[in-house]
Amino acid sequence: MALDIAPSDRFARLTEQSADYDRMAKALDWLAERWLERPSLDEAAEAVGLSPFHFQRVFTRWAGVSPKTFVAAIAHAEARKVLDAGANVLDAAYEVGLSGPSRLHDLFVAHEAVTPGEARRRGEGLVLTWGWSPTPFGKGLFVMAPRGLAGLAFSDGDDAAAFDDMHRRFPAATWVRDDAAAGRTALHAFAGGDSPLPVVLIGPPFHVQVWKALLRIPAGATTSYGQLASWAGKPGAFRATGAAVGANPISLLIPCHRAIARDGRLTGYHWGLARKAAMLGLEAVESQREAAA
């Protein structure tokens, strides 16, 4: 999105995308269970009780592409074939033309904010600024540490539960609400920030290693939990790796949604399979546009 667009206009667009996501959440949940089957427009619309015309109009406004194109992008059929043949995820991404840069993946870990001992004290001594803002994936809860984003979660209508889930990760920190700051961070992340958004990893050492490994997965690509375990230095530690992926506090920007089962199933996601499908689909669409440019 062009950076000369006024922040108020960019924020209005985020708000519109957030509302459209909420309308499409049921459809995305349905698609998340069936994307390997390449369902038709009529099947998807019928499943959520909408006419094909209305479903296509709202979905396309949110995603920027038709439902058919979105499902085709998320399928990654050729990438899965390459992965099944034993290639690593980076080779697979290049093989199917998904090697173009992605703004959302062009992030860096700015600072590991706490030592392992401090992490065990659950945020003691940290001042965390938090607030709500619309995002393309619904209402987002942003948690900012002094040196970068420390948490990003989503609400599906129960804001208190979403906040409690995040607060439990850092219960000893000092929490200060600032929705305006959250809105500025959302604009940086989703609507044309002119520099990478720094993120702060706060957690046990192995969790941090897994979260760093997630950053190696290109946008528009996926990998298995086994590959992540190897990248994190513990080959075979599938269960511990899965637990670390599930404990990731920074949705999307630390891309735990790119971890899938070896057979291509999306499997679980802390913020819901519908949101995981939405994230993978939009990233795949963006990557394919970049590859074709």
Image (cartoon, rainbow, N blue to C red):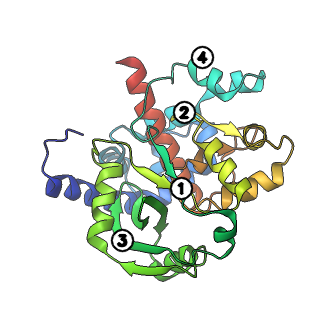
Question: Going by the picture, which residue comes out furthest to the right?
Answer: 236
Question: Label 4 belongs to which residue?
Answer: 95
Question: Label 2 belongs to which residue?
Answer: 218
The reply, left or right, for residue 180 in relation to residue 288 is left
Q: CA distance from mark 3 to mark 1?
A: 20 Å
Q: CA distance from mark 2 to mark 3?
A: 28 Å
Q: Which mark is residue 17?
A: none
Q: Earlier in the sequence, mark 2 or mark 3?
A: 3
Q: Earlier in the sequence, mark 1 or mark 4?
A: 4
User: Around disc 4, counting alpha carbons within 10 Å, would you say few (fewer than 14), some (14 to 19), or many (20 or more)?
Assistant: some
Disc number lying in front (3 or 4): 3
The kind of residue tagged 1 is Ala
Disc number lying in front (1 or 4): 4
Q: Using the rendered image of the protein, determine whether residue 49 is visible from the camera's viewpoint.
A: no
Q: Position of residue 257 (x, y in %)?
A: 58, 49
Q: Residue at x 56, y 62 (%)?
A: 249
The reply, left or right, for residue 247 in relation to residue 51 is right
Circle 2: element type: loop
Camera-nearest residue between 118 and 249: 118
Question: Label 3 belongs to which residue?
Answer: 132
